[in-house]
């Protein structure tokens, strides 16, 4: 885990090395000052040696200047290294997430990924900066100060040694207790982010159902959970301060008492006593810093584990060693296909024993009850998921043998949940083809019956779309997503209930344009409305993950009870459609 995180240091190795070097130099020069001060008092002031006072004073000034410069440089190098690590971690995580298959994405909630990219990375950044500076400074200060105290007077120095041992035990006890609480905080952050995300995304639903108070209560509950955990954890951590203060004053009193007796008998000089008191503060402050480092490391360890989970997650779907980079046509075959979500964890099949042979250019309608795995079936074509059993073939080739980019560029999918991104309409359309001209975008919109409303907008195709497409209607969003898919010039077009928000007349126009303008493209149309799939070459009826029937509209009316019941429920029992409605 540590090695995975430290891979993010990369080009920031030099400042990561220079920071502790600067810290060591800073501490070394600071630790000389108390000795120089003792020399001024004992050999300068008491001896009346002005020349010695000036000489040692200049050395003290020089040491202070060196400590200042190295301290500033150490701070700068640490900032560069820690922010660079944070930048690389976010970049690596984001790039890794982009490689995830749908099954990988299913393992992480959106709110959890957001927390890992923000709060967790910030914790690592702060911990790394503190480790480069304080984790080097505090132990170095402790070691040098202890060495100096034993050099001055080994008898008095034992007081420090006992104090250090006592405080080390106390810190370990407190940190072990606080660690468990800090680790519980991060799942609470996930819950808080989830609450915010859902509320902001669905704010119109919240307003429509007057659920503001309930959402505020939900947010307060998630926020209070974090508050309570941190209060408990910090309540334990703050015990450091009173215990540290008690120890410091006990040491000062003990050293003063012992030092006064030793001075009176000539075993210790006044300046040496002042140095010992100064080193006392240095030693105990370094212990305080070490306790803070332990807290930060504890928090960052939990964050590091969560970040490493994302970085170590391997995509379930990968390119073969020698991928095929050309899709010959839009024919599709399912051979004894079964599929289960989380199959390795005992997930039950949602598709069983699917066998289909579809010719290139056919229009295939798919219908079935909610939960009959219609979307799952078509997701296997572009290898958004891999089959649990059996194989899927596109253009006569197993989809596992294709280059993923080649396969997915040949299969355009308009998902059930349409998504537009912030930017102009042209920018959204060019997701289908990055170098598409405005004329190509216009033609695609004409096929999708989107041009009629885009052309009426004040800025036309340069109209800005808000995040998530909140400034267009559901039907307009669906038509723009269809146009975006058409721009790919695919061999296979999949519409997953993508005209549900479109009126029947517009739906019929879209299907008519498909028949006349892209006759060679294989089309899969998932729909709940019989009118949307009635004129398909064949219609597949799914029931609980199995094929209940397959055939033309007329054949299914005669032979398939499920299809006939849906048809009659939508037409009031009449088999006569208005031709203007179905196109």
Image: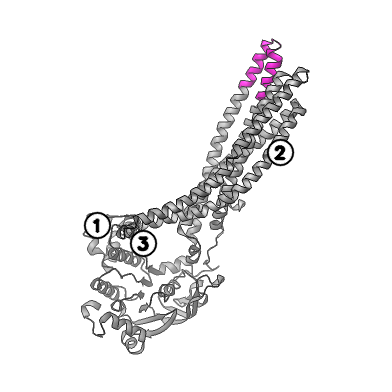
Specify the quadrant of the image occupied by residue 82.
top right
**Which residue is at the front of the view, 81 or 195?**
195
- Give me the residue at 43% from left, 67% from top: 408
* Residue 414 at x, y percent in the picture: 36, 68
In the picture of the structure, the residue carrying the numbered disc 3 is 419
Label 2 to label 3, Cα distance in Å?
Answer: 60 Å
Quarter of the image holding residue 423? Answer: bottom left
Quadrant housing the C terminus: bottom left
Q: Nearer the viewer, mark 1 or mark 2?
A: 2
Q: Find residue 227 and report its horizontal and vertical position in percent.
A: 49, 48
Residue 17 visible from this viewpoint:
no
Q: Which residues are magenta?
A: 32-61
For disc 3, the neighbor class at 10 Å (few under 14, some 14 to 19, many from 20) is some
Measured in 3D between alpha carbons, the distance from the residue under mark 1 to the one under mark 3, in whole angstroms, is 20 Å
Using a 10 Å C-alpha cutoff, classify the residue at mark 1 as few (fewer than 14 neighbours), some (14 to 19) or many (20 or more).
some
Query: Any magenta on residue 58?
Result: yes
Q: Which residue in the protein does label 2 denote?
A: 165
Q: Is residue 430 above or below residue 180?
A: below
> Which class describes the residues within 10 Å of circle 2: few (<14), some (14-19), or many (20+)?
few
Left or right, 112 with respect to 581, comes to right
- Pick whichever of labels 2 and 3 is earlier in the sequence: 2
Q: CA distance from mark 1 to mark 2?
A: 74 Å
Q: Nearer the viewer, residue 399 or 339?
A: 339
The residue indicated by pointer 1 is 460
Sequence-earlier tag: 1 or 2: 2
Magenta segment's dominant SS is helix
């Amino acid at each position: 885990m540590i090695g995975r995180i430290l891979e993010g240091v990369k080009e920031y190795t030099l400042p990561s090395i220079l920071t502790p070097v600067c810290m060591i130099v800073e501490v070394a020069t600071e630790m000389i000052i108390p000795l120089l001060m003792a020399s001024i008092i004992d050999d300068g002031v008491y001896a009346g040696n002005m020349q010695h006072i000036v000489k040692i004073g200049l050395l003290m000034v020089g040491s202070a200047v060196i400590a200042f410069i190295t301290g500033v440089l150490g701070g700068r190098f640490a900032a560069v290294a820690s922010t660079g690590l944070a930048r690389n971690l976010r970049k690596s995580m984001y790039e890794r997430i982009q490689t995830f298959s749908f099954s990988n994405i299913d393992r992480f909630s959106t709110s959890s990924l957001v927390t890992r990219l923000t709060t967790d990375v910030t914790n690592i950044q702060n911990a790394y900066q503190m480790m480069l500076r304080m984790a080097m400074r505090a132990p170095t200060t402790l070691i040098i100060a202890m060495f100096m105290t034993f050099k001055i007077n080994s008898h008095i120095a034992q007081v420090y040694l006992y104090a250090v041992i006592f405080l080390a035990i106390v810190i370990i006890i407190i940190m072990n207790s606080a660690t468990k609480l800090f680790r519980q905080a991060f799942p609470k952050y996930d819950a808080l982010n989830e609450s915010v995300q859902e509320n902001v995304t669905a704010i119109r639903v919240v307003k429509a159902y007057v659920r503001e108070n309930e959402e505020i209560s939900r947010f307060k509950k998630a926020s209070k959970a974090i508050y309570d955990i941190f209060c408990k954890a910090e309540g334990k951590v703050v015990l450091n301060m009173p215990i540290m203060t008690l120890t410091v004053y006990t040491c000062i009193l003990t050293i003063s008492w012992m030092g006064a007796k030793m001075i009176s008998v000539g075993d210790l000089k006044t300046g040496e006593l002042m140095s010992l008191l100064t080193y006392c503060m240095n030693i105990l402050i370094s212990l305080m810093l070490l306790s803070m480092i332990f807290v930060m490391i504890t928090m960052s360890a939990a964050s590091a584990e969560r970040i490493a989970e994302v970085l170590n997650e391997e995509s379930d779907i990968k390119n073969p060693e020698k991928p095929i980079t050309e899709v010959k046509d839009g024919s599709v075959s399912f051979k004894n296909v079964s599929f289960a979500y989380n199959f390795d964890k005992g997930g039950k099949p949602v598709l069983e024993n699917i066998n289909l042979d579809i010719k290139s250019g056919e229009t295939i309608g798919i219908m079935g009850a909610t939960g009959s795995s219609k979307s799952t079936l078509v997701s296997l074509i572009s290898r958004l998921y891999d089959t649990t059993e059996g194989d899927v073939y596109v253009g006569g080739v197993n989809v596992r043998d294709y280059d993923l980019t080649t396969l997915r560029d040949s299969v355009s999918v308009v998902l059930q949940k349409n998504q537009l991104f912030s930017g102009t309409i042209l920018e959204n359309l060019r997701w289908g083809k990055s170098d598409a001209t405005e004329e190509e975008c216009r033609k695609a919109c004409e096929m999708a019956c989107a041009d009629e409303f885009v052309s009426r907008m004040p800025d036309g195709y340069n109209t800005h779309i808000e995040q998530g497409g909140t400034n267009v209607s559901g039907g307009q969003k669906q038509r723009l997503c269809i146009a975006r898919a058409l721009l790919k010039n695919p061999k296979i077009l999949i519409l997953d209930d993508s005209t549900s928000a479109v009126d029947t007349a517009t739906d019929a126009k879209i299907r008519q344009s498909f028949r006349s303008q892209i006759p060679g493209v294989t089309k899969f149309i998932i729909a709940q409305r019989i009118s949307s799939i009635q004129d398909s070459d064949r219609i597949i009826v799914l029931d609980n993950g199995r094929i209940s029937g397959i055939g033309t509209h007329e054949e299914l009316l005669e032979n398939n009870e499920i299809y006939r019941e849906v048809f009659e429920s939508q037409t009031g029992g009449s088999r006569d459609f208005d031709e203007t409605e179905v196109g």
